[in-house]
Image (spheres, rainbow, N blue to C red):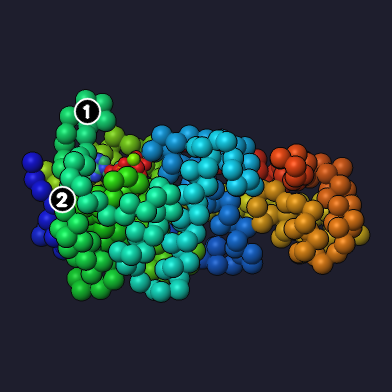
Amino acid sequence: MADIKLLPPDAELETRRVMKQLVRSHVALAELKGFVSMIPNKNILLNAITINEAKDSSEIENIITTHDELFKAMLRENHKDLAAKEVANYRTALWHGYELVREKQILTTNMIIEIQSLIVTNRAGIRRMPGTVLRNETTGEVIYTPPSGEKTIMAFMDNLMKYINEDYDSIDPLVKLAVIHYQFELIHPFYDGNGRTGRIINVLYLILKGLLDSPILYLSKYIIRNKSAYYRLLQEVRTKSNWEDWILFILEGIEQTAEETLLLVKKIRDVLDKTAEDIRVKLPKIYSRELIDLLFYEFYTKISYIEKGLNVTRKTASNYLSSLEEEGLLVSQKIGKEKVFLNKRLFEVVRQAGTER
Ligand SMILES: Nc1ncnc2c1ncn2[C@@H]1O[C@H](COP(=O)(O)OP(=O)(O)OP(=O)(O)O)[C@@H](O)[C@H]1O
Ligand SMILES: [Mg+2]
C-alpha cells in the first residue's frame, strides 16, 4: 500500500493528452467567466448556484434533502429537518471561504480549518487521535490509512499550502487543482468533512488564480455522476502513480461543468428578463429594477425585505407582493409565523437543474 508523498509530484503531469484537454477546459471556463462578468447583479446567480452545489456536495455524503426543505431551512434557525440544516451549513461555509479568499488573496490551513468547522459544526479541528481510515464503500475493507499525529498532518498541510500559494513549478493551475484535490484528500486532515471541504477548496483555488471571479463552478454533480471512477482514480494515483487519468478526469469535469453552468446561468437570466417584462407590462405602477433584483435575490422574499429594499411603507410593500401573487409570479407560504413569497419561476429553473443528473 503506497503512502502519501510530499508535493510536488515526481512525475510528468502535462502529458500530450493532458495538454489537449487543458485547452478545452480553459476555453469552457473562460466562456463562463466572461458571460458571468457581464451580468449586473451577480448575487442573484450566486445564491441560486450555491444552493444547488450545497445540495449536491452534501448528497455525496448521503445528506439528501429537497429544494423545498432547503428553502425552509434557510428561513428558520431551528428547523427540524437536519439534512436541510446541514446543507444550509455547507452553503454558509462556502460563502465564508469565498469572503476569506477574496479578502486575503491567499489560502491558509487556518482558513481551511474554519471552513470545515462550519460544515461539521464542531471545533474538533485537525485530527489528534489515530484510527481514521478510508474503506472500500461496498466491502468495508481498509484501503488507505491517512497520516496521523497533528504534527505530521500539519507538515503535510504546510507543504500543500506552499504548493497552492507559491507557483514555483509553473504547472498549469487546472492541472495543479487536480493535484491539490488529490493531496488534500490523502492528507485527510479532519475526522469528517474532508470531501466537502476539499470540494470547496477547488472553487476557492480557481478564484485565487483568477480563473473565476465568483464561486460558480462546482464539480460535485460531476463527481456524483462518476463516483466510482472518482474513487478508483484517487486510488490509482497513489498505488500506480496514474496521474494522467486522474488529471484528465478532473479536467473533463471542469469542461463539462463549465458548459452546464453556463446553460443554467443563461436560463436564470432569461427568467429574470421575462419576469421583468411581465411586471413592466402588467403592473407598470410597481415596476422598478430594484424590485426585480429583490425578487431574484433568493428564491423567496418577505414584506420586510421589500419595505427596506425599496424604502416604502409596510402597507405598500404588502400590496406589491399581493399584486405579484395575483399575477401568478409569486406564491405565498406560511413558514412558522412568517409569510414568505416564493419566486416560482426562479425556483423551478434552479430546482430542475439541481435534480437532473
Ligand atoms: N481511496 C481514496 N483515496 C483518497 N481519498 C479518498 C479515497 N476514498 C475516498 N476519499 C476521499 O475522502 C472523502 C470522504 O471523506 P470524509 O468522509 O471525511 O468527507 P465528507 O465530506 O464527510 O464525505 P463525502 O466526500 O462523502 O461527502 C471523499 O470525498 C474522497 O475525496
Ligand atoms: Mg463523512
Q: Quadrant of residue 102?
A: bottom left
Is residue 135 visible in the rendered structure shown here? yes
Residue 74 or 98: which is nearer the viewer? 74
Q: Position of residue 215 (x, y in %)?
A: 48, 60
User: Marks 1/2: CA distance?
Assistant: 20 Å
Q: Which residue is mark 1?
A: 140
Which quadrant of the rendered structure holds the N terminus? top left
Q: Is residue 310 left or right of residue 159?
A: right
Q: Nearer the viewer, residue 220 or 40?
A: 220
Numbered circles on residues, count:
2
**Considering only vertical position in the picture, is 200 above or below 170?**
above
The residue singled out by tag 2 in the image is 147
At a point 75% along the width and 51% down the height, the residue shown is 302
Residue drawn 39% across and 60% down? 114
Residue 130 place in picture, x, y as percent:
17, 45
**Label 1: few (<14), some (14–19) or many (≥20) C-alpha neighbours in 10 Å:** few
Q: Position of residue 272 (x, y in %)?
A: 70, 54
Check the image and report above or below for 176 versus 138.
below
The three-letter code of the residue at mark 2 reads Pro
Badge 2: residue crowd in 10 Å (few <14, some 14–19, many ≥20): many
Q: Residue at x 55, y 67 (%)?
A: 37
Question: Nearest the camera: 171 or 187?
Answer: 187
Is residue 170 visible in the rendered image? The answer is no
Amino acid type, label 1: Gly
Quadrant assignment, res 79: top right
- For marks 1 and 2 on the same chain, the one whose residue lies earlier in the sequence: 1
Answer left or right for 345 relative to 166.
right
